[in-house]
Amino acid sequence: MSAADVRVGIIGCGHIARGAHAPGYHRAGATMVACADVVPERAQRFAQDFGMAHWYQDYHQLLDRDDIDAVSVTVPNRFHQAVVDDALARGKHVLCEKPMAVDRASAQKMRDRARQAKRILMIGFQNRFRPEVQRLKTMITQGDLGPIRYARAGWMRRRGSGWGWYSNQDISGGGAFIDIGVHALDLAYYLLGSPTARTVSAMTYQQFGRYQLAERVEWQSADASEGLDDGSIFTVEDSGMALIHFDNGSALFLEAAWASNLVESESLFVDLSGDRAGAHLFPLELYEERHGTLMNTRPSIPGKDASSEEIRQFLGDIQQGREWPQMNTPDEGLAIQSLIDAVYRSARRGGVSVEVESREGSALD
Ligand SMILES: NC(=O)c1ccc[n+]([C@@H]2O[C@H](COP(=O)([O-])OP(=O)(O)OC[C@H]3O[C@@H](n4cnc5c(N)ncnc54)[C@H](O)[C@@H]3O)[C@@H](O)[C@H]2O)c1
């Protein structure tokens, strides 16, 4: 089976579908069959632009097609669970954008449904596919860093709030943490070897809300950029930090900001402190002591488009007839979602330490 034999559909024809998914499938040589969006003109334009023969306003009609093997789910966060559930129930493989869901309970249902359906459900944490992340992962697995005691990770923006549904709690499930902090959390969790988390203590803030600034760096929904949503609903945090303790004794300090008074306009970073060496992303740097000298190394690693690599992995799993993804599994998505839930639970209680619900466990409160 080649990539061209995998027939795909895209549900949600907004910015990430246009910027990453459709181009990724095109580059990989998959067959793009149909798309769907509740805004019909958007679906029609998308189908025309990416050479898809069919478009729908109701995604169920897309899922009813027998000539679609796999779908990308690129709708706003709140709708991930329902669409993924419907897609898996109709036997489709699914690449679902991050965050997996708006809360742990929804993520758990999605994971359980994927197990039942025996179909690939991959979660769209594309940063894992950056070549420098893969290189660092190999180094860690080979023991180059030694045991990692402590990590710091974050995605910080000076002014770059999500506009449109992103700032509406009911649809997004949260602000900076669930939107961009989740990428930093996923990277750290992946590089630390998916440790079991024990407790979280977190604070979140809404200091800036909706601001007017021409030069802001931002990601906005298709509705916001088309003037259909003025972004006036701002019911989420725009910054926060969390301290996560893992069962193996290691700890992660996590930061997220859509807006904060910082020197840099934007940074996504992970710092790992191992007994033998430390590492920093991005770019990848390594810190160690060798022959009585402190050494800093910056490996030269050719770049690759992470979203395209993620899509190649998704298609590859399907081509090989797998029932469970090799990367970005629903179990990992659920673990990340459990941590995000704990961050918000702790923040609602003023930062007290809260337990993280286990992968299999039931709700604590
Ligand atoms: N991996 C990344 O780095 C990354 C980057 C941006 C966005 N995302 C994620 O991708 C998802 C989409 O984000 P976006 O910025 O493209 O949003 P968007 O608002 O630009 O696009 C979402 C589209 O879904 C459509 N839609 C809503 N409900 C629908 C339904 N029931 N059926 C069909 N279509 C429906 C909307 O009309 C819209 O066109 C979000 O979950 C977001 O977190 C991930």
Image (cartoon, helix red, strand yellow):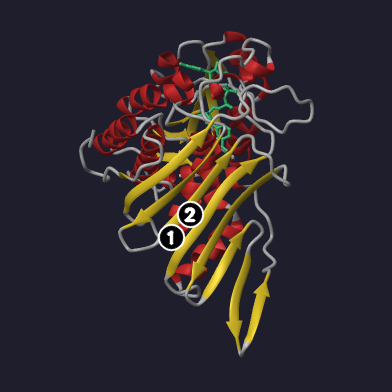
- Say few, some or many: other residues with alpha carbon within 10 Å of mark 2 (under 14 / 14 to 19 / 20 or more): many
Q: Is residue 339 visible?
A: yes
Which residue is farthest right?
Answer: 214
Question: Residue 135 at what x, y percent from top left?
Answer: 56, 64
Q: Residue at x 46, y 63 (%)?
A: 150
Height in image: 298 above or below 175? below
Q: Which residue is drawn at 23% across and 43% down?
A: 360
The residue positioned farthest toward the left in the image shown = 362
Q: In which quarter of the image is the C terminus?
A: top left
Furthest residue toward bottom = 291
Q: Position of residue 117 (x, y in %)?
A: 27, 34
Frontmost residue, 120 versus 101 = 101
CB under 8 Å between discs 2 and 1: yes
Residue 260 location (% of width, % of height): 65, 38
Amino acid bearing label 2: Ala
**Circle 1 residues within 10 Å: few <14, some 14–19, many ≥20:** many
In this view of the protein, can residue 308 be seen by the observer?
A: no
- Quadrant of the image occupied by residue 14: top right
Can you tell me which quadrant of the image ligand 1 is in? top right
In the image, 74: left or right of 90? right
Which disc is residue 188 wearing? Answer: 2
- Compared with 326, 110 (above or below) is above
As drawn, the label of residue 192 is: 1
In the rendered image, the vertical position of residue 295 relative to residue 278, given as above or below: below
The type of residue carrying mark 1 is Leu
Q: Is mark 2 on a helix, strand or loop?
A: helix
